[in-house]
Structures are given as C-alpha cells and as structure tokens.
Amino acid sequence: MTSKFTTDWLHAWNTHNLDAILEHYSDTIRFSSPIIQQMEVDSKGEITNKTDLKAYFSKALDNYPDLHFELYHEIKGVNSLVLFYKSVNHSLSAEYMELNSHGKISRVSAHYKSFPDLTTFLDTWLKSWTSKGCPEQVEPLLSFYSENCFYADPAIRNGIRGKINLREYFRKLLRYNPEWEWRRLEVFPTPGGCSLKWVVRIPVGREIIETTGLDILEFEDGKISRNEVFFDRHDWLQLISKTQTKE
C-alpha cells in the first residue's frame, strides 16, 4: 500500500502546486538530478538550498505544463524511500529520498531512463512474431532473446531453457500462426524488466479471434532473459477444434 507521504507528494506534483511540493522538502537539502544539468540550472546537477530548489521546481513546472507522474513502485527503507515512476516525456525515474527526523526530504538522488526505448523495443519484438509464412522469421524473433533465456506459455507451463532449445518451438508457433498480429496495450516497468499487456488477432480458418494477455519480461544486456506468457486459450482452442471438424 502506498504511504500517505508518497500519495501527497504525487498529488502535489500532479496538481502543479509548487507550495505543496516544497512542503515535502527540508530547509537543508541536497538534491542531485541529470535534469538539473539538462535545464542548465547547475552544471554539476546539484542543488544545496531550498531557494534554488524552489526556482528549479518552478522552472520545471513551466517547462513541462503537461507534467504528470505515474507511480509504479514505492520501496521503503529506514528513513528513506525509492520511488519508481513515469516522469516527464514518458521517461522512467527512480528517485532515492532520505527523510529527516521531521519526515521531510533532506537528500534526493534522481535517475532517469528513456521510456520510448522500451516501447520501441517491445513494438519491434511483437511485430517479429508475425512471420507471413516466412520460415526464416524465427531467427529475427530469436535475436531478441539471450542465449540462456527462459520461456513459458500456457502450452508449456514448465518452460524451455536456452535459445537453442527454443528455436524449434518458436518455428512451430510461427508455422501454424503465420498471420497472427500482436499489439502493445500497456507497459508496467519493473526492476529489471516489465509486465506487458497485449492484444493478439489470430486468424483461424475464415474467422479471427481476438484476445488479450500478459507477458512478464526480464532483460539482461538488452536481451530478453525471461519471458512468461499468460492468457486464456479456451476460445482459441475451441475455434481450432471447430474448424478442423468442419474440414
């Protein structure tokens, strides 16, 4: 459950209430962020007094009129917090905060990663699942996975370990479903990966079934190291059975 402190902090930022934002910070503050450098507030990316912090926050609110933070995780420590959230320009932020004895933020270290990089990766990966009947499409698909990856879906609940062992299974999936199309709906970043909600359109005979599902993904050196797929196959399998009976 998200703490009242974090809930109030998010509300202050998302309502662009500068005074309410500053209420969360100590009069003695050390705040470091690459955005401080990007906005040319301080070349070292650091602010050490509340007056400068107010000026920085005011400039940030002016520069980003559509600013809206979306919290993914709150991780609690001893007199400290790490907030993992979607920040400006859809970037990912991990913000470490230390709290003083009065519950005010006295130290901040902010970290950012471009969110579009992840969505671009996912969209390209999803597109590679459509082979259009090309048997060699399995290789571009496998290129997204690490050598020692783990993959599981409802058909193989115990999973498959290793890209070499995965090749034949993926080849079979693409051969039987050459025209299916996958599309990203929502992405929920997690430490080391993400959860991806998707929709897929699967032609079966003259009919098309559409269903949604969820992938849990972990990454290692820019490759998928773990991929677990969850969705209800009931309607799809029934349609396949119905089509085969007619034939």
Image (cartoon, rainbow, N blue to C red):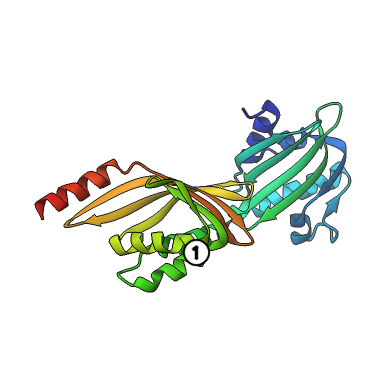
Q: State left or right for residue 59 relative to residue 149.
A: right
Q: Residue at left 33%, top 72%? A: 134
| Residue 237 coordinates in the image, percent (x, y) | 25, 46
Which of the 4 image quadrants contains residue 30?
top right
Nearer to the camera, 58 or 108: 108
| Quarter the C terminus occupies | bottom left
Q: Is residue 42 above or below residue 186?
A: below
Q: Is residue 141 visible?
A: yes
- Disc 1 residue type? Ile
Q: Residue at x 67, y 28 (%)?
A: 3
Q: Nearer the viewer, residue 43 or 80?
A: 80
Q: Quadrant of the N terminus?
A: top right
Q: Position of residue 24 (x, y in %)?
A: 76, 33
Reply above or below: 103 against 240.
Answer: above
The residue to which callout 1 is attached is 164
Looking at the image, residue 80 sits to the left or right of residue 184; the answer is right
The image shows residue 13, relative to residue 136, as above or below, that is above
Q: Residue at x 37, y 47 (%)?
A: 155
Viewer-closest of 146 and 24: 146
Image position, residue 91 (x, y; %): 62, 54
Element marked by disc 1: helix
Q: Answer few, some or many: residues within 10 Å of disc 1's Cα (few below 14, many 20 plus, some between 14 and 19).
A: few
